[in-house]
Amino acid sequence: MTFRERRYDHHAGPKPLAACWPDIPMNPPARIVTEPMPFERERREMIDVQLRRRGIREERVLEAMFRVPRHEFVPPAYQKASYDDRPLPIGQTETISQPYIVAAMTLAARVAPGDKALEVGTGSGYQTAILAYLGAKVWTIERNPGLADSARERLKRLGFNGLEVICGDGSEGLSAAAPYQIILVTAAAPEVPPALLGQLADGGRMVIPVGDLIHQDLLLIFKHDQQIAQRMLDPCQFVPLIGKQGWPEREGWGR
Ligand code: SAH
């Protein structure tokens, strides 16, 4: 395997997905499209100020970010801040990622309808919902049983389908449904878990934060003809990936 590193140029941006696959159908839950839209002004501002201006210009990704009701994924105490430019607490130590990071990971993954996606770190289920909206078939793994149960219930209540929420250690992936065209890891790993690399399909994309417990780089990893290439997207800060191929369990790391 060879590794090639290149910096990601946000301004040039990747080729818009719509230009590669025109008229791709999405998979929005009916009630999300037909019901009145709470927080409409905040959603529009999030799209324009936090996403478009920072280089997220793929219309399908913007549409999913606009339509998926982020306020349904945050605890009631934080609902007013749902569309703010920051992560928010969803548990003792866990967070729902900042909207820009969710959009950047989704854009980099180049989601096409029917893609099989593995997400490690379900949390609130927000990123899962964005992937499902774009038509991916999603397997998402969460180690905290309380969060896994509430994400499963929430996604069902909102009408998302084509996804499965599993409770367990996702650092080893999920071999039962492998290989995946997309692997998104939404918790910080000390290094790319070899199990996940092994479960990435040929032509697949993995997006994963790698670094120490405080600072990480968001990496985009491609597999092509069994060769691996990677590119740095953004500096970032995620909660730790705790598990066999992540960080060891420690006191106070929620559960
Ligand atoms: N994608 C989430 C944000 C997740 S925060 C969202 O949109 O809301 C990171 C999550 O990863 C936390 O809920 C944490 O419990 C979970 N996590 C950490 N290590 C894990 C592991 N080995 N397997 C599965 N989930 C893990």
Image (tube, rainbow, N blue to C red):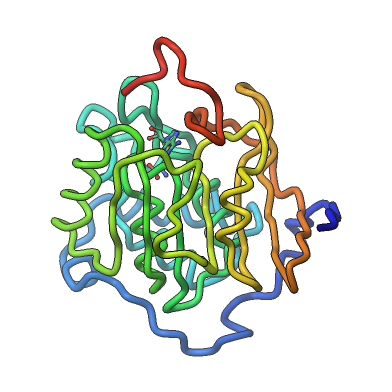
Q: Which image quadrant is residue 218 in?
A: top right
Q: Is residue 47 above or below residue 82?
A: below
Does residue 19 appear to the left or right of 4 in the view shown?
left
List x then y, in percent, for residue 245: 56, 36
Q: Which residue is drawn at 28% across and 35% down?
A: 80
Q: In this view, does 92 lie above or below 197?
A: above
Q: Residue at x 28, y 38 (%)?
A: 74
Q: Which image quadrant is residue 31 in?
A: bottom left
Quarter of the image with the C terminus is top left
Q: Which residue is drawn at 30% across and 63% down?
A: 163
List x then y, in percent, for residue 139: 37, 58
Does residue 57 appear to the left or right of 187 in the view shown?
right
Q: In this view, does 124 lie above or below 248?
A: below
Quarter of the image with the N terminus is bottom right
Query: What is the count of numbered marks?
Result: 0
Does residue 135 appear to the left or right of 193 in the view shown?
left
Find the residue positioned furthest to the bottom: 23
Ligand 1, what quadrant? top left
Q: In this view, does 128 lie above or below 90?
A: below
